[in-house]
Image (tube, rainbow, N blue to C red):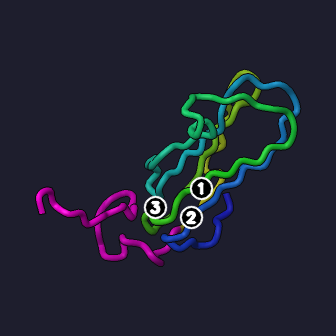
C-alpha cells in the first residue's frame, strides 16, 4: 500500500475499515496482521476480540470498524498491515495493504533498549509489607 506519513511513537495509530455488506455472510471476523520491516508478524487482532469470541455476526449495509494500535507500543520503524476478511464461504487475504512508519518522537526505544516492541508499561511505587 501507499506509505502513510510518519507517526510519533507516542501517538496511537487508527486503522479504519469502511465497507458494505450486500448479502448474508456466515459469522466471521476481520483480521489485522501487523508486520515489521523484516516481515515478522508482531501481532494479530480481530474484530471479534472485544466479545471474547472467535467470530461475530454480520449485518447488511455499510459498516465502519476502527482498530486502534496504542501509542508507545511499536518501536520506531516501518510496518505493514495485512487484512484477512470473509467473502462468501471463505476468507480473502490482502497482503501489505497499508504501510506506515513510526518515528522516535516520544519512544522509549530512543534510549537504545532492545525488543521488537517498545511499550510503556505501568510502574507504581508501593509500600512494602510491614513498612
**Label annotation for residue 12:** 2
| Magenta residue span | 102-131
Q: Which residue is mark 1?
A: 68
1 vs 3, front mark: 1
Dots 2, 1 in contact, CB < 8 A: yes
Dots 2, 3 in contact, CB < 8 A: no
Describe residue 26's horizontal placement relative to residue 37 as left or right: right
Q: Are there few (<14), some (14-19), or many (20+) residues within 10 Å of tag 2?
A: some
Describe residue 93's horizontal placement relative to residue 117 as left or right: right
Residue 88 placement (x, y as % from top left) = 76, 25
Establish if 87 lies above or below 35: above
Q: Which badge, 2 or 3, is on the more N-terminal residue?
A: 2
Real-space CA distance between mark 2 and mark 3, rounded to the nearest whole angstrom: 10 Å
Q: Which badge, 1 or 3, is on the more N-terminal residue?
A: 1
Residue 19 placement (x, y as % from top left) = 80, 44
**Label annotation for residue 121:** none
**Membership of 55 in magenta stretch:** no
**Label annotation for residue 74:** 3
Amino acid at each position: 500500500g501507499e506509505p502513510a506519513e510518519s507517526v510519533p511513537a507516542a501517538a496511537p495509530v487508527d486503522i479504519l475499515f469502511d465497507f458494505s455488506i450486500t448479502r448474508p455472510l456466515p459469522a466471521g471476523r476481520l483480521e489485522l496482521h501487523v508486520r515489521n520491516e523484516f516481515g515478522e508478524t508482531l501481532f494479530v487482532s480481530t474484530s471479534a476480540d472485544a466479545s471474547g469470541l472467535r467470530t461475530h455476526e454480520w449485518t447488511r449495509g455499510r459498516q465502519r470498524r476502527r482498530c486502534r494500535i496504542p501509542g508507545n507500543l511499536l518501536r520506531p520503524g516501518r510496518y505493514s498491515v495485512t487484512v484477512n476478511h470473509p467473502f462468501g464461504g471463505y476468507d480473502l487475504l490482502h497482503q501489505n495493504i497499508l504501510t506506515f512508519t513510526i518515528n522516535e518522537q516520544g519512544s522509549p526505544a530512543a534510549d537504545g533498549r532492545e525488543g521488537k516492541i517498545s511499550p510503556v508499561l505501568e510502574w507504581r511505587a508501593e509500600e512494602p509489607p510491614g513498612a
